[in-house]
Amino acid sequence: MSRFLTPIGITGLVLMLATGTALFSADAGPLAGSDVFQTKVVLIAIAISNAILFRLLWQRRLAEWDARPPIIGRIQALGSVGLWLSAATFGRLIAYG
């Protein structure tokens, strides 16, 4: 499943970065000074770093995860979901902050 979903995830990330850059350039001045926007960018950077770290730490053992996933890997995966949901939430809050 990982081999199938990873290219889709990377494609989605590239599209998100491209469209996000276009949206940012339309109103860069006020956005750059927004605490909400800055928090969103930091969350995205942490989420990307977490995804890369996850891949480096667990790629060789992913085949074994169906039987018994390690607790640290589960926590890291749950943290990843939380980071991406938080980044999306802060993205929605930009209009109000």
Image: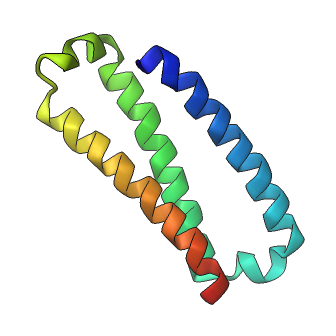
Residue 96 lies left or right of residue 60; in this view the side is right
Percent position of residue 32, x then y:
73, 75
Question: Would you say 4 lies left or right of 83 here?
Answer: right
How is the model colour-coded?
rainbow
| Residue 88 can be seen in this image | yes
Q: Which residue is pictured at 46% across the width and 32% down the height?
A: 52
Q: Residue furthest right?
A: 26
Q: Residue at x 63, y 79 (%)?
A: 94
Where is residue 21? Give x, y as percent: 79, 56
Q: Is residue 95 above or below residue 53?
A: below
> Picture quarter containing residue 96?
bottom right
The quadrant of the rendering that contains the C terminus is bottom right
Up/down of 96 relative to 10, above or below: below
Instruction: Give the residue displayed 39% in from the left and 23% down from the top.
Output: 56
- The total of numbered circles placed on residues is 0
Q: Position of residue 54 (x, y in %)?
A: 36, 31
Q: Image point 27% across, 11% down: which residue?
A: 63
In this rendering, is residue 59 above or below 9? above
Q: Residue 97, can we see it?
A: no
The residue furthest bottom is 96
Pinpoint residue 39: horizontal percent, then vertical percent.
53, 71
Task: Tell me the quadrant of the picture where the N terminus can be found.
Answer: top left
Residue 60 picture quarter: top left
